[in-house]
Amino acid sequence: MEQIDLIIAARWILPVEPENATLDHHALVVHEGVIRAILPAEEASEKYTATTRIDRPDHVLIPGLVNAHTHSAMSLFRGMADDLPLAEWLEQHIWPAEGRWASNQFVRDGAELAILEMLQGGTTCFNDMYFFPDTVAGLAVEYGMRISAGMIVIEHPTVWAQEPSEYLSKGLAIHDQYQDHSLVRTCFAPHAPYTVSDETLNRIRVLSDELDVPIHMHVHETAYEIEMSMKEHGCRPLDRLDRLGLINPQLMAVHMTQLDDGEIQLLADRGAHVIHCPESNMKLASGHCPVTALLAAGVNVALGTDSAASNNDLDMFGEMRTAALLAKSVTGDATAVPANAALAMATINGARALGRAKETGSLVAGKLADIVCVDLNKPACQPVHHPASQLVYSASRDQVTDVWIGGRQIVAQGKVTTGDEAEVLERAAAWHRRLADDE
Amino acid sequence: MEQIDLIIAARWILPVEPENATLDHHALVVHEGVIRAILPAEEASEKYTATTRIDRPDHVLIPGLVNAHTHSAMSLFRGMADDLPLAEWLEQHIWPAEGRWASNQFVRDGAELAILEMLQGGTTCFNDMYFFPDTVAGLAVEYGMRISAGMIVIEHPTVWAQEPSEYLSKGLAIHDQYQDHSLVRTCFAPHAPYTVSDETLNRIRVLSDELDVPIHMHVHETAYEIEMSMKEHGCRPLDRLDRLGLINPQLMAVHMTQLDDGEIQLLADRGAHVIHCPESNMKLASGHCPVTALLAAGVNVALGTDSAASNNDLDMFGEMRTAALLAKSVTGDATAVPANAALAMATINGARALGRAKETGSLVAGKLADIVCVDLNKPACQPVHHPASQLVYSASRDQVTDVWIGGRQIVAQGKVTTGDEAEVLERAAAWHRRLADDE
């Protein structure tokens, strides 16, 4: 009998790799933060002696969910200005509020709220883009959560930096600081083609190559963005990025609601990743990312919630469901994005896009133990004919009972163990009072 | 000081009538099952002495949600056959399973599971269509829930009846039995234009007029249905129903994904109601109900989940969100179906469609006290800038803490007080084993 740290046995395990697998009455064996084995529960009991053994008889274990695009601090703007067109929403509400309020303290309080929400909802890794990414990275470490911190770059001055060099040097300082930290990775995060110059994008491409760091960028979010680019640059934004050498396996292109067949093929040929944010795109009426065509072409498509200002939550269960339903709806094909494909988009595809597939995104031996346990013994999820169907089409974020990240239990009985929820909620409510007084 | 049964004070009340109102620090005063008053909490304390006083400082009170279209017993088929085209789903999975399994006991166990799920999720009234409606009506009464029981009619024989006269006589017996019961109303429920003959529809129209009872029917669910009708009858189903005199204020036409401008105007002119089931339509790739155009024309549009076999849950919070997001997405207009409109569709519009707007659907003095309390002090819902936004775009069914129906508390601390959840879940799990053995 081998002595190990942890055995988690459950009614079902959906490891995501191999594709579409459902394991009945299996166990995950975890030692020193790493998945040692995944095998029938009975066999696990025969082979291993565990310091901690956990049994979840009505539950399904899945890999930690990867939120591949968010702006966590913006949770403080949740529901502040809904049901408005994108331009009015941004120009009359979000940007003025950011100009007035987006301080380091705002980012800390907003990101902490977001981290609590994400952890409770089974998200173990998030790809963030906002000001003060150092603050958000520090919080993720405090909470024991994985982050890909965006080294944000915008051509114009903001509260975070004055000009591209300063953005880059501040970002690279974070990259250096966390070089050896298992929870934190970094991405270059040029905001969008329309807010970053060719010169700066060139510099980012060179740095991305040198440092082997991904690039996280909003691309083709709306038809208006394409029109503007045609006027200003005489070409579509993707053409411009292509000329700058940016369409490559480091690129995470977020939104992509405007794509022609040639562009889909280009993305496939170059191995670029697409981050699909269906709820944000629907809420802002931005258009549809052609997910089914992208997947058919072999493009890796991951899922993101976008910020709670345009979603209005950071719920990857909801996002999986919406992705599956929307794909069927826009193609008129009920077989589009089946449940297992939605689950893969929310896990392994996100890990691949972030360049973190060796560490997370599926439950296989050798990967870090990022594990989520979901209780299916609820009226909304019984009977369980196919656990993947229940996860995607009927389970809610509130059915997450446990979350482990790198083998450390971060959520137990639905509560985050590494922070004080009441304090975080009180700080969020205080921000409401501040913002409301300002109106 | 007047002595009354119950005061419920909350941080916010969204009464739905008047339209778009948000009341801060108000209370609902309830006596003998009826809303006596809705007024500032301080005033309530001065005017009334309550046998029971409940304070919900971080919560919002809304009218009980009305699920205007479901087949509750089909919850036992939840997730049994997903990600399939409608025809294959129905013909190769649902219909054979119904033929094999849809007994009175199946309906009892399935409907009880559905009732638990709906109550926990804040639904206080449902419009049901399935076999053994007497059984479902009896269960609703046991649980203290409002039902509009469908007097189902299909031209062909099923487990419930052999031919139209028998369907009608069995249905009318239920109508008579519950004539004076405040929880139970009935609707004629001819399944669809393609499964019921002109002769039977004529008879139903006459009975509906005589008895003042609504008619609940699937209409224009798919393009295929229109094609078939053109072949068989030489006209679209709505034309046929119009010739039969069925397009009138008693009609609840469910789905309606195929509508031209003339048909939208016809529905408006005649005061017919449309029941929108966005998640089911998306999942089965049936098309989009033109909700924005219908509302603009003045048609009353209510919301239904459809059954858990095609949704896969009975969650009206999810349905409100999907209705709001889908409307924006298909119109390209981010202002379509704002949060308050989605809430109205899930409450007062449903009550109107069912002919029950005098008793339920909004929180106004004189109506029955059908009240739902939702806790917004959760990481996914803070800060609260606008409670209607939080309800529609970020709250989940699991945040429902209390439900009162006719002043009686049916859900407390998220648990149904009138049934045994563990038993119901065990019976549902047993149905999984039976259905799985059969595969």
Image: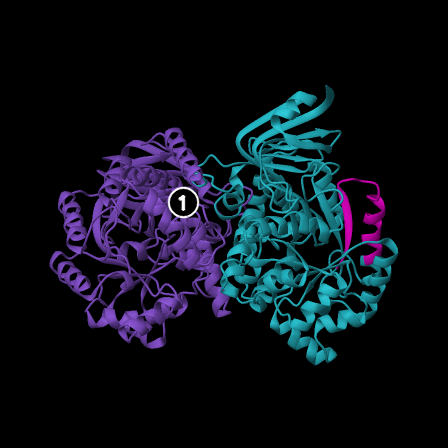
Chain colours: A purple, B cyan
Q: Secondary structure at mark 1?
A: helix
**Residue type highlighted by circle 1:** Phe
Which quadrant does the N terminus of chain A fall into? top left
| Quarter occupied by residue B5 | top right
Please give the chain letter of the residue carrying mark 1.
A
Question: What is the x, y in percent for residue A352?
Answer: 27, 57
**Nearer to us in this view, A223 or A287:** A223
Q: Is residue B423 left or right of residue A214?
A: right
- Which span is picked out in magenta? B168-189
At 67% from the left and 42% from the top, the residue drawn is B362
Residue at the right extreme, as displayed: B210
Question: What is the x, y in percent for residue A246?
Answer: 21, 66
Is residue A40 visible in the rendered image? The answer is: no
Is residue A225 visible in the rendered image? The answer is: yes
Question: What is the x, y in percent for residue A198?
Answer: 20, 66
Check the image and report above or below for B312 versus A124.
Answer: below
Which quadrant does the C terminus of chain A fall into? top left
**Nearer to us in this view, A22 or A390:** A390
- Find disc 1 in the rendering and name its residue: A77
Residue A186 colored magenta?
no
**Nearer to us in this view, A237 or A358:** A237
Residue at the front extreme, as displayed: A438
Check the image and report above or below for A208 versus B34.
Answer: below
Q: Give the total number of marks visible in the rendering.
A: 1
Q: Badge 1: few (under 14), some or many (20 or more) residues near its Cα, within 10 Å?
A: many
Question: What is the x, y in percent for residue A2?
Answer: 22, 36
| Quarter occupied by residue B292 | bottom right
At 52% from the left and 39% from the top, the residue drawn is B398
Check the image and report above or below for A254 versus B54.
Answer: below
